[in-house]
Image: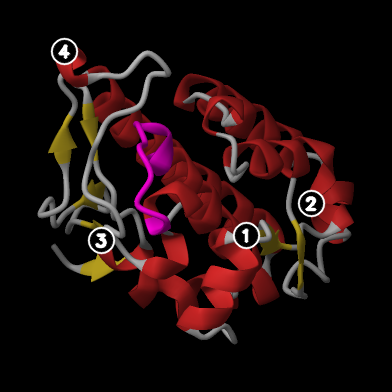
Amino acid sequence: MQVSFRDFVPVWSALLIIHIYIYILFCGNSLDQLNNLVLLFFFCSIIYRDLKPENIGYDVRGVLKIFDFGLAQELRPKEMFEDGTYELTGFTGTIRYMPPEVAQSQRYNSTVDVYSFSILLWEMLSLKQPFADFTCRMHNQLVVMRNVRPVVPDIWGSRINNLLTNCWSPVLNKRMPFEDICTCLSEETYSCHDDSICDDMGDCNSSTHGNGR
């Protein structure tokens, strides 16, 4: 393993400044690989529970890899409750990417990885660390209890806005399945072949926080 997503942030920042089109294609390819890997976990009834830049990287061939499976857990159908959730260890993972239900030690399911993926996606698109100025107490009060989420700039478009809003929803069954995420991101990448879209994305680094849905 050569580098993690976190190591790539300076490179992505340079690409964004020099040529937004190149960055979009690179980002789209990475997200497509990542989504396919997490989708494989879903089909194998495995939840990862610690999706973050430090646990994702590239090998010497540039192929995306996920590592550190210390918190991964197999889901057993016989242990599933009627609402599709499981009694699993609470407060597991990294706070910044941790879904509210995990932070509150409630029952949960594979949609926890969808939530983490959405925060990671926002980070890749904005090149900003989500909730960077939040203390643990602030994160609990604002993100967990009041559903505050990173603001999605209008320039990102309605498709990305809807995807993120659905994926980081506090309601588990409202989160978008990974199959649909893959389709949505593929469509968005193709749409960015329109240079007019790329030319208008100079402000995509600006970020604040607002109420999620």
Tag 2 secondary structure:
helix
If you read the primary sequence from the N terminus, does the residue marked by circle 2 or circle 1 appear first? 1
- In contact (CB < 8 Å): disc 2 and disc 4: no
Q: Quadrant of the N terminus?
A: bottom left
- In contact (CB < 8 Å): disc 1 and disc 3: no
If you read the primary sequence from the N terminus, does the residue marked by circle 1 or circle 3 appear first? 3
Residue bearing the label numbered 1 = 125
- In contact (CB < 8 Å): disc 4 and disc 1: no
Quadrant of residue 201 within the rendered picture:
bottom right
If you read the primary sequence from the N terminus, does the residue marked by circle 2 or circle 4 appear first? 4
Residue bearing the label numbered 2 = 156
Q: Residue at x 18, y 68 (%)?
A: 2
In the image, taking residue 115 as reference, residue 174 lies left or right, namely right
Residue bearing the label numbered 3 = 55
> Which one is in front, 174 or 179?
174
In the image, taking residue 17 as reference, residue 140 lies left or right, namely left
**The label number, if any, that marks residue 78 in the structure image:** 4
Q: Type of residue at label 2?
A: Trp
- Residue 69 locus on image (x, y percent): 13, 50
If you read the primary sequence from the N terminus, does the residue marked by circle 3 or circle 2 appear first? 3
- Determine the CA span between mark 1 and mark 3: 18 Å
- Determine the CA span between mark 4 and mark 1: 39 Å
> Which one is in front, 48 or 6?
48
Q: Quadrant of the C terminus?
A: top right
Q: Type of residue at label 1?
A: Leu
- Residue 197 locus on image (x, y percent): 85, 49
Q: Type of residue at label 3?
A: Asn
Q: Is residue 68 above or below residue 176?
A: below
